[in-house]
Amino acid sequence: MDYAADLHIHSPYSRATSAQSTLAGLAAWARIKGIQVVGSGDFTHPVWFSRLKEELEPAELGLFRLKDERALPSPLPGISPALSTVRFMLSAEISSIYKRHGKVRKIHNLLYVPDIESAERINGRLAGIGNIVSDGRPILGLDSRDLLEILLELAPEGFLVPAHIWTPWFSLFGSRSGFDRIEECFGDLTSHVFALETGLSSDPDMNRTVSALDRFALISNSDCHSPSKLGREVNLFSTGLDFYSLRDAIKDNQLDTFRGTVEFFPEEGKYHFDGHRLCNVCLSPHETRGLAGMRCPVCAKPLTIGVHHRVTDLSDRTAPAHKPNAPQVFSLIPLPELLGEILGVGPSSKEVLRQYAQVITRFGSEFDLLLRTPLDEIIRAAPLLGEAIKRVRTGSVIRRPGYDGQFGVIRVFEEGECPSSGRGKTTRLQLLQE
């Protein structure tokens, strides 16, 4: 079966997360996006875990469905998505803060397990180590290596994936508190780690300049804190719809079962370049290295060293090296952002949501439109949108990198090229042809 899976999300019990991130809300948006498997997120949080047990029931092996999945309300007026398959896979993210080799480490790791009993055993162990109640993504003084050991002991069929591995503040290779080598983090258990999450600010091409990562599969997920952001990055599979087939497809890392990943253009990620947001300073790695002490040229405070800089520090290749039969990579701009650019308004505006509903109704799902629908069909129905998607698919986009927590901007049209440029706010541009 061909399906898309977003395996890193958060519940309403994680900080700065929308109250709309309920199981029903996630499932409804998954149908609109065209996603069939969604991580449950936050199974370590007692209240959320109770809701998982109450609202889900076993489906295919190691996956779960909503008990009342036919009664899902549409998240947006005017959208009636098809009753497509949506399954949940038990997942959690742990924030480990601990000291190793004389330095404080702050590492986020993702846990995946196939059954409620495994999650319960892990929760019981973690509750004895620290506070798992205050946040859906608990902060524990637990070494990443020891977290992996707990997983292997209590849920041996589960797996651990280091999260957004290049993010400066909380990741395996983060410039602020990470390691230079995976072995430094996981020690004697490193062989049990077979996949890494690239994060929004990097993509597989960047990671494949580091030969030490060659044996690892690279997965991509949204890490969404609201259900409308589901699928901004996602994984594509052609394998059995069950926990074990999905896990093994990632582990095998072959195109025939792990078809690929859908990525942000990495410049859009909010830590791609170096910089200091308070001073509006955004710098490439080359520019940063030319500064004394790599400090902000305005205020002299330390810069936040971004993902691109960190990758180049650890890379040993001048160009990416992908193995034969490697999963494909599709760099896309989320549909609301495309519509917002065309219409000349924000991606969350009422006008974007209105036309988003019309476009989804016409083409079936966001990923069907962005990835699979023939361009000539899109152009006949919506010429401007068709041209935008053509440019996205060919990578012909304008990039302004993100830095120090500020998202970058990816555009498809030059200034003045789009009909919305300079038009009055009360003028309505209709994308779909009658």
Image: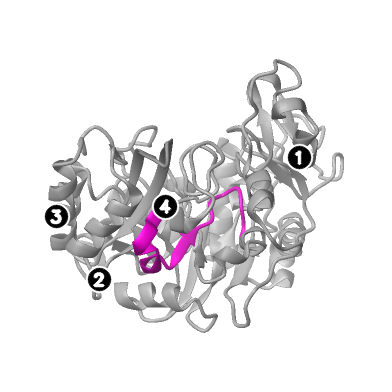
Considering every residue shown, the one lying at the far front of the view is 102
Q: CA distance from mark 3 to mark 1?
A: 45 Å
Q: Which residue is mark 1?
A: 284
Mark 3 surroundings: few (<14), some (14-19) or many (≥20) residues within 10 A: some
Q: Which residue is mark 4?
A: 185
Identify which residue, 110 or 398, lies in the foreground: 110
The first of marks 2 and 1 along the sequence is: 2
- Mark 3–mark 1 CB contact (< 8 Å): no
Scheme of colours in the image: one colour
- Mark 2–mark 3 CB contact (< 8 Å): no
Find residue 120 and name its label. Answer: 3
Q: Say if residue 243 shows up in the picture.
A: yes
Mark 1 surroundings: few (<14), some (14-19) or many (≥20) residues within 10 A: some
Residue 99 in the image, given as x and y percentages of width and height: 37, 38
Q: Amino acid at mark 3?
A: Glu
Q: Which residue is mark 2?
A: 157
Mark 2 surroundings: few (<14), some (14-19) or many (≥20) residues within 10 A: some
- Residue range (magenta): 186-203
